[in-house]
């Protein structure tokens, strides 16, 4: 092969390295033709690489592929012939795919999310609050056969999270709505730690986290390897929601005794992109390498959803470090619940 017309598409879950930077990942020389995927960071969790070209795979080329900058689970030639013409290479295929849908960017900075079970194409949408931005995405995915739309999941009842349920149901009637008891059009409210599935491969556990609202529920998802949590307005990257319907004790329970006990490599998908303002406040009370790393990340990136883990939050989120001596000194309190309340009051009034 002396030349190739490459159309590369890499679908990824974010890197385990929370501070990775975009790079150009180059494939090695294959039959004398150097190819590359420009302008896209391809971390080890890369799911699927589609190469729209006629590529003859031999044992030699397979060996070369194994040295690319992402983990290769398996690649097999299944014909008797030593050469096989292919158009798609599956590399460490994930069961779970997540598509973010930014909403009201520049004002509310919300996120909705589409979660897809890759095997069955069954999918749900999380917090589809703004139909003009969400429904076109859903329609394209459904009409193209990429998903079987199975339900709506809400993290809490506020209109900027559950306010799009009714309009979504007009387009897709009889769709189940899973969420807190006060969510609009809700059909099912899971109990704390109750489990259910999306498709065949994604296990979901509901985690009740009352405080921001009393019906707040976070959802912990596993596909056997990848772990994520949708946190609504309970946990943000480097922050937490206001205590509109709850207390410091409830937020402490939600953040530190429930979400904080999830596996450290669980990726966090919050309801809003508030990280820049959160970490500005965080740095005013806790100046550590982890905090400074997040400050730098925010200077270089506009979006942080899915790029940080529970383990990261335990390092840079001041609301999850209420027993840290530096934070206690900044708040003038030592009792954990008083520290939590003081931090919330300070954040509410922060103008940095």
Image: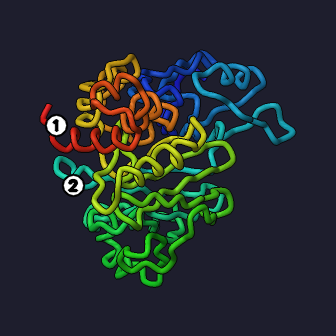
Residue in view at x 43 percent, y 31 percent = 323
Return the x and y of residue 344 as percentages of the image width and height.
27, 43
Residue in view at x 48 percent, y 39 percent = 9
The answer to which of 283 and 329 lies nearer the viewer is: 329
The answer to which of 334 and 204 lies nearer the viewer is: 334
Residue in view at x 60 percent, y 59 percent = 204
Total marks drawn? 2
* Residue for badge 2: 104
Residue 232 lies in quadrant? bottom left
Q: Along the horizontal axis of the image, is 45 left or right of 183?
A: right
User: Can residue 167 be seen in the rendering of this structure?
Assistant: yes
Q: Quadrant of the N terminus?
A: top right
Q: Is residue 157 above or below residue 294?
A: below
- Of mark 2 and mark 1, the one earlier in the sequence is 2
Residue in view at x 19 percent, y 44 percent = 348
Return the x and y of residue 93 as percentages of the image width and height.
64, 43
Give the numbered dot on residue 350.
Answer: 1
> Tag 2, which secondary structure?
loop
């Amino acid at each position: 092969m002396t030349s190739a017309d490459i159309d590369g598409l890499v679908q990824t879950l974010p890197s385990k390295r929370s501070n990775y930077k975009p790079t150009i990942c180059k494939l090695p020389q294959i039959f004398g033709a150097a190819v590359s995927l420009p302008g896209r960071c391809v971390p080890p969790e890369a799911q699927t690489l589609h190469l729209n070209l006629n590529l003859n795979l031999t044992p030699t080329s397979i060996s070369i592929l194994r040295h690319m900058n992402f983990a290769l689970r398996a690649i097999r030639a299944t014909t008797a012939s030593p050469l096989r013409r292919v158009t798609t290479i599956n590399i460490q295929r994930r069961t779970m795919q997540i598509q973010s849908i930014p909403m009201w960017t520049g004002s509310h900075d919300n996120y909705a999310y589409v979660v897809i079970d890759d095997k069955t194409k069954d999918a749900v949408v999380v917090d589809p609050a703004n139909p003009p931005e969400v429904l076109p995405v859903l329609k394209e995915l459904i009409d193209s056969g990429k998903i079987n739309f199975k339900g709506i999941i809400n993290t809490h009842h506020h209109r900027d999270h559950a306010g799009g349920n009714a309009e979504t149901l007009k387009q897709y009637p009889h769709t189940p709505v899973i969420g807190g008891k006060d969510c609009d059009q809700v059909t099912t409210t899971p109990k704390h730690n109750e489990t259910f599935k999306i498709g065949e491969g994604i296990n979901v556990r509901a985690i009740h986290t009352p405080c921001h609202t009393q019906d707040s529920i976070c959802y912990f998802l596993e596909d056997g390897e990848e772990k994520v949590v949708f946190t609504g307005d309970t946990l943000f990257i480097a922050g937490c929601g206001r205590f509109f319907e709850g207390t410091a004790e409830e937020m402490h329970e939600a953040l530190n005794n429930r979400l904080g006990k999830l596996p450290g490599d669980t990726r966090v998908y919050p309801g809003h992109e508030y990280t820049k303002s959160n970490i500005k406040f965080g740095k005013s009370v806790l100046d550590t390498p982890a905090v400074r790393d997040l400050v730098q990340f925010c200077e270089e990136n506009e979006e942080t959803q899915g790029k940080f883990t529970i383990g990261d939050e335990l390092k840079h989120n001041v609301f999850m470090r209420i027993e840290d001596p530096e934070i206690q000194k900044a708040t003038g309190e030592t009792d954990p619940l008083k520290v939590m309340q003081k931090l919330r009051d300070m954040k509410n009034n922060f103008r940095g």
